[in-house]
Image (cartoon, rainbow, N blue to C red):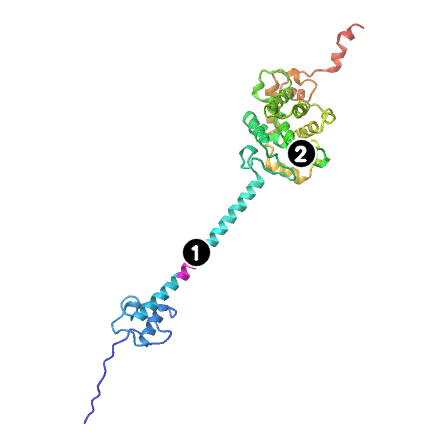
Amino acid sequence: MRSTMRMEHRPQSTFSTVNDDSRCACCCQDPMHQLCAVHSTAIRNGLGGSRTVVGKCHSYLSPDAKAAEVCMLKRNWTMKVTRFVGTACAVLLILVLGFVQTSNLRAAGRAPAPDHQSSDTADRTPNIAIPDSKLARDAARYIRDSEGEFLFEHSTRVYCWAALTAQRNGLPYDPQLLYVAAMFHDYGLTENYAQSHLRYEVDGANAARQFLRSRGVSEAASEQVWLAIALHTTNGIPAQVSPLAALVAQGANMDLVGAGYDDFAAEQRDAVEMAYPHPQDFVEVFMRTLYDSLRHRPETTQGTGLADVMAYEDPHFVRRDFSALMRNSHWAARK
């Protein structure tokens, strides 16, 4: 008698094997795929279903397996979000640090003029600082608006050379008064004095004194600034008047003809030049500025270096000959 065996029908699994490295037939073949691992565990424990898996491996899971799958999904997404946020923060930090470093380099190389800064002044050269005060800001604004950028930057360099000279030689000085004197020392060259027949140095000295008086500066201090400006083109006198007068004259001579050039360290010269560079055509532009401002009053240039400028620009200009004046005077004619 042929025995009959009863074959139990088992539902076909969609997994070829059931172990820790099982992979879903419908999903990626990555053995590390956590969802497939959860599914295979569910089948091994008798929790898997018999229907064909369609799409992802989570299409037919028991509640417990689904909960485990959701938990794993959340953990994976949390890790991904954490990595993304960390990377984004690192990139943002690099960009911020780069921006700050660039801003600092620009500020060190070329800061705004005193009247355009939040603190309104900046230390832009070694061991010196433009005075940070309302008086200095007002002077800078007044001169820049009246003279333009060319003479304003020349005046700023004059202050820098003068302040460095004072520190090197141990000369006492008031930074605010020195700054105002440097700002106004060429103010007499502006178009405000197109009809003046005073020496341009006196016009500038008068304007500086009025500026200081209007802001409550003492008469004695105002007179010091007046003398410093009025005498800055008269060689040999300023040093005998006051440290302020000597410094303005030395600063102007350094910026125009390089007087005392080797007395400054190369680092100092480079720093001043980087902050307030001489234009390539500085010499010709400055000489033309002098001539245009003085040609209606050439008599005021006689006996000074300005007469040389007049002769350079105007071939018909005649320098006064002091010897000829004496020989042709009334006193000489009486003999």
Residue 118, relative to residue 7: is it above or below?
Answer: above
Give the mark, 2 or 1, whose residue is nearer the N terminus.
1
Instruction: Give the residue at mark 1.
Output: 85
Residue 41, by quadrant, is bottom left
Q: Which mark is residue 76?
A: none
Q: Is residue 288 visible?
A: no
Residue found at the far bottom of this picture: 1
Q: Quick one: SS at disc 2? A: helix
Three-letter code for the amino acid on which mark 1 is drawn: Val
Magenta region, main secondary structure: helix
Instruction: Give the residue at mark 2.
Output: 163
Residue 101, relative to residue 236: is it above or below?
Answer: below
Residue 76, relative to residue 128: is it above or below?
Answer: below
In the image, what residue occupies the spot 29% across and 69% down? 63
Residue 104 coordinates in the image, percent (x, y): 55, 43
How busy is the neighbourhood of tag 1: few (under 14 within 10 Å), some, or many (20 plus)? few
Q: In this rendering, would 175 be left or right of 192?
A: right
Q: In this rendering, would 208 be left or right of 98?
A: right
Residue 323, relative to residue 74: is it above or below?
Answer: above
* Range shown magenta: 78-83
Three-letter code for the amino acid on which mark 2 is drawn: Ala
Q: Which quarter shows the N terminus?
A: bottom left
The verdict on residue 82 being magenta is yes
Residue found at the far top of this picture: 334
Q: In this rendering, would 260 be left or right of 86?
A: right
Q: Nearer the viewer, residue 80 or 157?
A: 80
Residue 210, by quadrant, is top right
